[in-house]
Amino acid sequence: MGEPGKVYLVGAGPGDPDLITVRGAQLCRDCDVLIHDSLVPAELVSSSSAPEKIYVGKTDGGHAMSQEEITALMVGLALRPDGPRSIVRLKGGDPYVFGRGGEEALACREAGIPFEVVPGVTAGVAAPAYAGVPVTHRVTSRGVIFFTGHLAGGNLEHLPWDQLASSGFTLVSYMGVKTAGRITERLLEAGLDPETPAMMVQEGTTPGQRSVTGTLETIARVAEEAQIRPPAVTILGRVVELSARLGAQRPRPLAGRTVVVLKAEESSYDELAPLRRAGARVVEVPIVRCAAGPEHHQGRATVAGLGPDDVVLLRSGAAARFFGQAWLAVNPGPQPRLIAGSRTVAHTLRGFDLQVSFTEERAAGAAKILAAAGVEPGSTIWLPRSRGAGDRTIRVLREGGYHPRPIPLYDTLPVVVPADVQSLLSSGRTDAVLFLSGSCVEAAVAAAPGLATEAGKGITFGAVGPLTAGVAEGLGIHCAVIPERPRVGDLIGSLMAAMGVGDPAPEGMEDDRTDPPPSSG
Ligand code: SAH
């Protein structure tokens, strides 16, 4: 048996996905297995490229897995012969603060499994901070006590109430929403001043952040009236008064908004960054995948027959990739003339040691690209692409006097959509859904038919280009956001403008890819 895998106990931070540490984010992205639970920001999970993601959190009914099962799972994975090398156990906040991370670490130690802990920003500090409360403050609050209001073993009696009440420190309770009434009663009985300022913060640092204030005597009632729900922390102490002067941290313009981006499995888009910076929760969902098989032999045979007199136009990353692969496989000598629809496409082609004779820099229609490249009308234009691609480019090229000849080199296939994403789409709990290709629309409607009916009602749909929007329309989905140039960056700009943030300035080009545009990464 080889060396065991390594377990990383990673703190995910309090809720805002940007509040994870750099080390933690890197491990989440690159690990072999990601084990996560309910208080972990969904974005950290969806953006991880871990081949295996295991949800062990609470379902509505209770624990999906017991602590013992989770520990056994982790240890079992690490000890599996030829198993994963890196296992990230991602836990909300800090892994060692009320998260049973200590037990998981000990279990690893006992099983001889190497582990590393990556601390996180704990909710008991972060939620008050975002609500305008520093947990300690000069003179008035020289310390802070974190305690749990969870009724482990059935009661709260074992907490040292007298000491909590007389400490003079800020008190922060975790897991104490249901027990708020009993906690405050005990503290009153133990002699803590009924007028002690109090606050409860729900879903701190997330778009759903809400807080209520009161006193030790009133806070439980106030929170109940305001329907404060877990996860929430309760803060008791003079520091709560500072919130009146500091104010809650202003949410970013798109805080609270969720944008689902339906894309191809192999792509990632830096262009989504502005949305995230504006505070939106961006869920990237790989919903299609491009694949070549024996059924594309004809396309490859066509590629084998191309020579220096032929002109090949490539406009998507997948097209460039499959063309490059086919070319290397058949390797028939002098290459045809290659025209790249974007810099990314050119870059991909060069990765196959191919010469690119022209690269479109500004994004234009197919006929315009050819004209700019100096290709005479009347020429035959070879178009490597997906089997199911639409005929818009063909039409545009014919109108421009060219003779387009498609080369089907791959298929765009749907990917199985994880249950959590399916429910996100079917429930309408998202503000915007962006389709990066017609095949993405088809796959999405297949996975969540409700998108075209009930669930889709409150959603703003966006399409990368008119053809994609046309596919959506055909399936009963109206795309309100379509950028003038079919570029992901422009789509994001248009969406942000539609949401009242930012302002893009695009220009025209047709769009008929079935596979999404080239990724930036
Ligand atoms: N390890 C976590 C705490 C796990 S216990 C940490 O360090 O933060 C879970 C409790 O944490 C919840 O019941 C709630 O009291 C608190 N909590 C977690 N996320 C929170 C948030 N975003 N806002 C307020 N409280 C939160």
Image: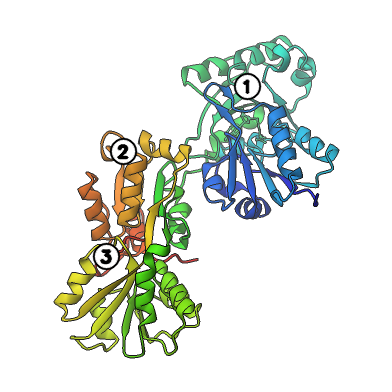
Q: Which residue is mark 1?
A: 176
Residue 161 placement: quadrant: top right
Residue 315 placement: quadrant: bottom left
Mark 3 and mark 1: Cα distance apart in space: 54 Å
Q: Residues within 10 Å of mark 2 (few under 14, many from 20)?
A: some
Q: Find out if the beta carbon at label 1 lies less than 8 Å from the nearest ligand 1 atom.
A: yes
Please identify, in this view, whether the residue under mark 2 or under mark 1 is nearer the observer.
2
Q: Which residue is mark 3?
A: 511
* Ligand 1 quadrant in view: top right
Residue 386 on image: x %, y %: 34, 64
Callout 3: SS: loop
Residue 446 on image: x %, y %: 33, 43
Callout 1: SS: loop
Question: Is residue 137 positioned above or below 151 on the image?
Answer: below
Q: Amino acid at mark 1?
A: Gly
Q: Which residue is mark 2?
A: 449
Please identify, in this view, whether the residue under mark 3 or under mark 2 is nearer the observer.
2
Q: Residues within 10 Å of mark 1 (few under 14, many from 20)?
A: many
